[in-house]
Image: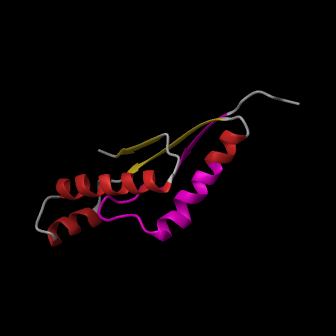
Amino acid sequence: MNTEKKRYTITSALPYANGPVHIGHLAGVYVPADIYARYLRATGNEVLFIGGSDEHGVPITLKAKKEHTTPQAIVDRYHNIIKDSFEKLGISFDIYSRTS
């Protein structure tokens, strides 16, 4: 039997930083990836689970225009909201960052 640890990198879709995450994001992307990362860790493997806020794209520009602010102000606000939500929900990211 091979007892050598394997190394895994797990990534997930990057939510646009133009609004909070919702149950569809969680059920369709982050919970399944988190379950897989936890399973691999529990079976003795080395896992790096990486995610981040997508700070580029039309949805962010449209949100900024609607709120009469800058795209940077939108991504700064929503990145923190999204990251905080993942932490409170216990999603086991090793790294959660930003595309900027």
Image quarter hosting the N terminus: top right
Q: Position of residue 50 (x, y in %)?
A: 49, 43
Which residue does the image show at 43% across and 68% down from the upper left? 22
Q: Position of residue 11 (x, y in %)?
A: 52, 47
The answer to if 14 sits in the magenta stretch is yes
* 98 to the left or right of 24: left
* 31 to the left or right of 83: right
Q: Position of residue 77 (x, y in %)?
A: 24, 56
Which residue does the image show at 50% across and 45% down from the upper left? 93
Q: Where is residue 95, by image quadrant?
A: top left
Q: Nearer the viewer, residue 32 or 84?
A: 84
Image quarter hosting the C terminus: top left
Which residue is at the far front?
88
Q: Where is residue 5 in the image (x, y as percent from the top left)?
A: 72, 29
Region rendered in magenta = 7-36
Q: In this view, does 8 lie above or below 67?
A: above
